[in-house]
Image (tube, helix red, strand yellow):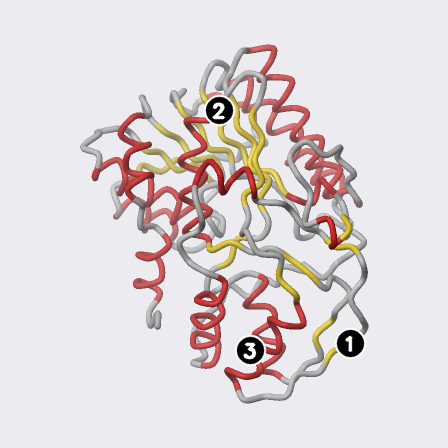
Amino acid sequence: MVETIEELEELLSEPTPAVNETMGRVKGDLIFLGVNGKMGPTLARMAKRASDAAGVRRRIVGVARFSSGNGQAQLQALGIETIGCDLLDPHSLSKLPKTENVVFMTGMKFGSTGQEALTWAMNCFVPGMVCRHFAGSKIVAFSTGNVYGLTPVARGGSVESDALNPVGEYAMSCAGRERIFEHFCRSTHSPMALLRLNYATELRYGVLVDVAQKVLAGEPIDLAMGYCNVIWQGDANGMTLRALEHAAVPRFVVNVTGTELLSVRHVAEHFGRLFDIRVTFRGTEAADALLSNAGLAQKLFGHPRVSVEQQIEWVAGWIKAGKPTHGKPTQFENREGKF
C-alpha cells in the first residue's frame, strides 16, 4: 500500500536498470518543456535519478510558467534547474538554453472547447517555434491516442501505422502538432520521437481514479466508452526517457500505453468488491472505443512493471482513505472529442 505523496512520487520517479543504462548512453543536457504538469515533475526527477545512477553529470532543466503552487521550488530542491517561461512568447522562448535533448510535454486539452484558437496555438504554433529554436536537437514529444479516433474493440487497438482520424478540435490540433514536428524533423534534420500516450495513471489522477471515485460515491458508471487502456505513470516515464535513443529522421512513433484492453464495467466491479459497494451502470458498451495497441512499446521497452491489478488495489486504498487527488477528471468517456 502506498501511504504518502512522498512515497508515491518516489515510486513514480524510480528508474529501472534499463532507464539508468539509457541515461548513461545519452549524450548532453536535457530540457523538459511543460515540466509542471501531471507527469513532468516525476519524469524530470526520474531523469535526474537515472543520470546520477549512471554516473553522468548533465544539466537537467525544467521549463514552465510556474504560475501557481510550489512546483518550481520542489524541482529545484531535487537538483533540477528551473526556468519560468511562457512558450507562446517568442522572446521568452528565444532565451532558453539550447540543449542536446528535449522532452516536449506542453499542450492544451481541458478547456479546449470554447477556446479553440488558443488550443491550436498551444498545440501547433508553439511546437513550430520550439522546433526552430531547438533545430538539430533530439526531441521526444508527447502526442495522444486521440489522433486515431475510435476503433473497433475486436481489433485490439490502433497501431502506429494506422491513418489518423481525429474527432473534435482537440484531437485535430494534436494531429496538427504531429505534422509540425514531422515537418521540422525532416527540414532541420532533428531526430524526433512522438509518443502517443493514453492513458497514464497514478493515485491522484487518471481513468482508474475517475472510476473509483464514482463507485465509492455510489454514482452510476457511464459505459459509453466501454473499454480503455491505461499505463502506470512511472512506466510511461521510463518509456519516455528510453525513447530518446529511438528518436530518428524521419520521426519515430510509438504508442505508450498498457498491454491490456480493459473493460470499464469489469474495472468498476473490481472497485465495487474492494469497497464492498454494489455498482450501477448507465448505458451499454459500444462496439468501438479509443484504444491503442502497445505491441511496439512492449517489444522495445518490455512489459510495464506495475500491473493493472496492482494499480486498482493502490487506487482503491488511496481513494478510500480520502487522500488528495488532482481534482481533474480525465473525461475518458467522452466520445465526441469535446474537452
In this figure, which residue is indicated by the disc labeled 2? 247
Q: Label for residue 282?
A: 1
In this figure, which residue is indicated by the disc labeled 3? 271
Q: Could you tell me which quadrant the N terminus lies in?
A: bottom left
Separation (CA) of disc 1 from disc 3: 17 Å
Q: Does residue 85 appear left or right of residue 229 in this picture?
A: left
Query: Mark 3 and mark 1 in contact (Cβ < 8 Å)?
Result: no
Residue 50 appears at what percent x and percent y?
28, 40
- Please tell me whether mark 2 sits on a helix, a strand or a loop: loop
Separation (CA) of disc 3 from disc 2: 39 Å
Residue at image point 81% right, 53% down: 336
Q: Does residue 284 appear left or right of residue 17 in this picture?
A: right
107 or 51: nearer the viewer: 51
Query: Mark 2 and mark 3 in contact (Cβ < 8 Å)?
Result: no
Residue at image point 62% right, 45% down: 293
Residue 93 appears at what percent x and percent y?
50, 26
- Please tell me whether mark 3 sits on a helix, a strand or a loop: helix
Q: Does residue 259 appear left or right of residue 118 in this picture?
A: left
333 or 114: nearer the viewer: 333
Tell me which label, 2 or 1, sits earlier in the chain: 2
148 relative to 103, above or below? below
Amino acid carrying label 2: it is Ala
76 relative to 176, above or below? below
Q: Residues within 10 Å of mark 1 (few under 14, many from 20)?
A: few
